[in-house]
Amino acid sequence: MSRAIQPVRETFLPFARPSMSLAEERAVVESLRSGWLSTGPKVSEFEARFAEHIGARHAIGLNSCTAGLHLSLLLHGVGPRDEVITSPITFASTANVIVHAGALPVFAEVDKRTFNLDPEDVERRITPATRAIIVVHFAGMPCPLAEFEELCGRHGISLIEDAAHAAGSAYEGRPVGARGNLTSFSFYATKNMTTGEGGMLVLNDDELADRARVLRLHGLSLDAWNRYGNSGYRHWDIIEAGFKYNMTDLQAALGLQQLAKLAEFNARRAEIAARYDSAFADIPGIRPLSHAVPPRWLHPHHLYVLLTIPETLGFTRDEMMDRIQRAKVGVGVHFRAVHLHPYYRQTYGFHPGGLPVAEGVGDNVLSIPLFPAMSGQDVEDVITAVYQAADRGRR
Ligand SMILES: *Cc1c(COP(=O)(O)O)cnc(C)c1O
């Protein structure tokens, strides 16, 4: 018999909450008082710091990671009649930008250990029309980049990295983004560091970087800071039909503070993840996604993912989520398989059965709260809520 679900705490614990301190407040006020509300000196400073942090030549401040992914496709010349392969276990934007570029989205299988794209399955889906692959570092776990680079080199196609989860990740001793592939980070409110909304495109190629800077601001030949600076009046020209993708100084002021604390944030995330690992090592019906990485890699613990096994639990993932929420603990899903969402089914005719591993992941994953501002008691409350939901006594 299933016991009734009881709240495990008085107040609802949200799935995520940003860590903002007096330093962020001061930085934003200082930025407001400077008079530069749009793209100005703070954006340049944040870009320089971020590029330095990654070890890349260029970091370009944007209003989202989505904008970075879209620009990456355009910079690589992706357009109509091209195919782009990506993961179905990702957020909407990774696939939507392929549609925005006019190309055909092709979804490949994920590795069942990491939920990252499986290079062998990707290779099977390459056709003469394939122009690019967008890999997603799921939860911040780096993809096997050397394998993807080798594969892309052999087929003459471009590699793009969705690093929305990967602030603070390292692959073979260097930060994700350092290898020169066009790489986009997200500073959305729930991410490991946040500017409220915001993103950064990181790359090494000087020409592509110049073009990205033009495309992010309407295709104008100079950015606003140069236009209104004190070096004499200069006309701007429209040299491309660009976009409104620029980052603001207010966002950059936040970003500079958050970047300085990223390592500390991620260390706290790792502590919480380790506590969850020991608590969930052997609950029947639930398997935590592994975040074990080789010695020279870093996992930033963007998410803590549980894979439910409905046959053992006796109920579905959705029921499990409902039970945890009723105990006053927030949950999330990262992610239901993108190709099975209505738009993708209706537009491209995708249907269940095509990608069994990814579809199994999409049907059975849930994410529990993992953010640096959680107290020790918050963490214990989550554990109690999961045990109760799984209908198991707490050890
Ligand atoms: C959050 C997220 C994005 C989009 O980031 P925005 O900055 O909100 O555009 C892209 N990909 C993945 C995997 C994400 O989780």
Image (tube, rainbow, N blue to C red):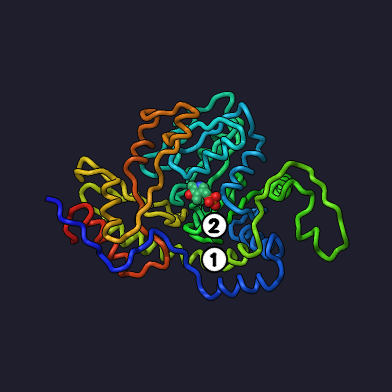
Report whether residue 75 is seen: yes
Residue contact between numbered discs 2 and 1, judged by CB atoms under 8 Å: yes
Q: Would the CB of label 2 be found within 8 Å of ligand 1?
A: yes
| Residue that appears at 67% across and 40% down | 75
Residue holding disc 2 = 187
Q: Image height check: is 282 above or below 95?
A: below
The location of residue 80, given as percent across then percent down, is 63, 29
Count the labels in the image.
Answer: 2
Task: Tell which of 330 and 151 is nearer to you.
Answer: 330
As helix, strand or loop, the secondary structure at mark 2 comes to: loop
Report whether residue 205 is seen: no
The location of residue 244, given as percent across then percent down, is 67, 49
As helix, strand or loop, the secondary structure at mark 1 comes to: helix
The amino acid type found where label 2 is placed reads Phe
The location of residue 86, given as percent across then percent down, is 50, 37
Task: Tell which of 271 and 129 is nearer to you.
Answer: 129
| Residue that appears at 82% across and 51% down | 236
Q: Image height check: is 166 above or below 108?
A: below
The amino acid type found where label 1 is placed reads Gln
101 left or right of 188 in image: right
391 left or right of 88 in image: left
In the picture, which quadrant includes the C terminus?
bottom left
Task: Tell which of 326 and 123 is nearer to you.
Answer: 326
Task: Tell which of 37 and 258 is nearer to you.
Answer: 37
The location of residue 35, given as percent across then percent down, is 71, 69
- Label 1 Cα crowd, 10 Å radius (few <14 / some 14-19 / many 20+): many
348 left or right of 27 in image: left
Occupied quadrant, residue 379? bottom left
Residue holding disc 1 = 258
Occupied quadrant, residue 359? top left
2 or 1: tag closer to the N-terminus = 2
